[in-house]
Image (cartoon, rainbow, N blue to C red):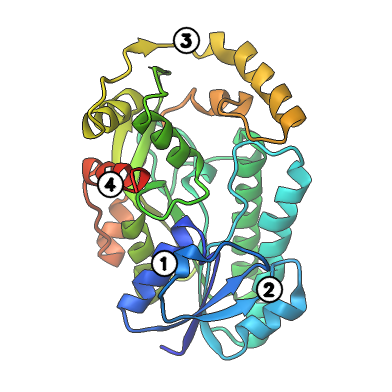
């Protein structure tokens, strides 16, 4: 199967890595781009542009015309939003609408970008670690949980030819928005991260995640989910590596998570008044209760997925911050 591959979210951080991985495989790529979107991540790439958005069924039909594959990467990814309903409309309703149009268009193969955020927390988790909607902290995690559940329902009931991928915490170049993790790294590079809380993340290079999407498109089993992750590190370890790469002293002050709740509450009030996303939020503190550690054994075994070291990924992210 070749033909045209449609990528949603292709102007974004993960999406642009997916676009590049597809092009490296010699595939023809079309990118669904929202009106007025920042297209810098597509500069110089030989891709078709389809202007449209998930809320507009007509634009989705036009974008899907002639496409044999779809990689749905687009999502509203923020850990704090003033209007959670808007995030649900994009991440859940928009996903449902796109999948319906893909079925009507006769798309033969779909990769849906979920997140490890929808998985349970039990030591080092894998694709089978159970979770429930009640476990999801914040509107982003709830929206991704509901969207993946919708994909699974459509696979079972409608024969949707979809494979699910669950990236962990990607870092690296082209994080122009930036993502919450990218913003943390930028602050650390600038020397504005003097303290940390006791939590952990699974760090992976964004380009490894991009190639993982293409491997899932080519070899993934319909209805299966695949974690696309890297190395498990504590936040203290991550910040130590970033500090060393940035020629700065590492943060030495570990803050008690519970003691930061009043600070986060005040930051959210300021965020609502200013319209700017706060650096610290109540949901981020609630999520920090667990170390977000995962394993990618299934993707490695079934897809041939590989990832570079967390240090290499973080070095790429630091270099990007200095551009």
Residue appearing at x 44%, y 11% in the figure: 255
User: Separation of disc 1 and disc 4 at Cα?
Assistant: 16 Å
Q: Earlier in the sequence, mark 4 or mark 2?
A: 2
Instruction: Check disc 2 and report the residue beneath it.
Output: 52
Viewer-nearest of discs 3 and 2 = 2
Instruction: Check disc 4 and report the residue beneath it.
Output: 313
Residue furthest to the front: 323
Q: Residues within 10 Å of mark 1 (few under 14, many from 20)?
A: many
Quick one: quadrant of the N terminus? bottom left
Nearer to me, 321 or 241: 321
Q: Earlier in the sequence, mark 3 or mark 2?
A: 2
Give above or below for 52 relative to 208: below
Q: Earlier in the sequence, mark 1 or mark 4?
A: 1
Q: Which mark is residue 18?
A: 1
For residue 220, say whether it is visible.
Answer: no
* Count of all numbered marks drawn on residues in the image: 4
Q: Residues within 10 Å of mark 2 (few under 14, many from 20)?
A: many
């Amino acid at each position: 199967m070749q033909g045209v591959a449609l990528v949603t979210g292709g102007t974004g951080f993960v999406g642009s890595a997916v676009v590049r991985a597809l092009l490296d495989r010699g595939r023809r790529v079309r990118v669904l781009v929202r009106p007025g979107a920042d297209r810098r991540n597509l500069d110089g790439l030989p891709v078709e542009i389809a202007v449209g958005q998930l809320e507009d069924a007509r634009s989705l039909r036009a974008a899907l015309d002639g496409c044999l594959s779809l990689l749905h990467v687009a999502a509203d990814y923020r850990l704090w939003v003033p209007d959670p309903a808007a995030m649900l409309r994009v991440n859940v309703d928009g996903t449902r609408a796109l999948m319906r149009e893909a079925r009507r268009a006769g798309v033969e193969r779909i990769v849906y970008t979920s997140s490890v955020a929808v998985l349970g927390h039990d030591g080092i988790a894998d694709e089978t670690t159970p979770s429930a909607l009640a476990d999801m902290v914040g509107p982003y995690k709830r929206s991704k949980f509901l969207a993946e559940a919708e994909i699974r329902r459509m696979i079972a009931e409608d024969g949707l030819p979809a494979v699910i991928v669950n990236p962990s915490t990607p870092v690296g170049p082209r994080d122009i928005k930036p993502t919450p993790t990218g913003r943390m790294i930028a602050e650390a590079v600038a020397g504005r991260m003097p303290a940390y809380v006791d939590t952990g993340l699974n760090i992976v290079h964004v380009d490894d995640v991009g190639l993982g999407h293409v491997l899932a498109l080519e070899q993934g089993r319909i209805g299966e989910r695949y974690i696309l992750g890297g190395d498990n590190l504590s936040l203290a370890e991550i910040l130590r590596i970033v500090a060393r790469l940035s020629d700065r002293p590492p943060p030495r002050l570990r803050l008690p998570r519970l003691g930061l709740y009043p600070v986060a509450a005040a930051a959210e009030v300021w965020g609502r008044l200013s319209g700017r996303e706060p650096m610290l939020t109540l949901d981020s503190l609630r999520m920090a209760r667990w170390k977000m550690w995962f394993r990618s054994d299934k993707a490695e075994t079934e897809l041939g997925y590989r990832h570079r070291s967390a240090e290499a990924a973080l070095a790429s992210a630091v270099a990007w911050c200095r551009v």
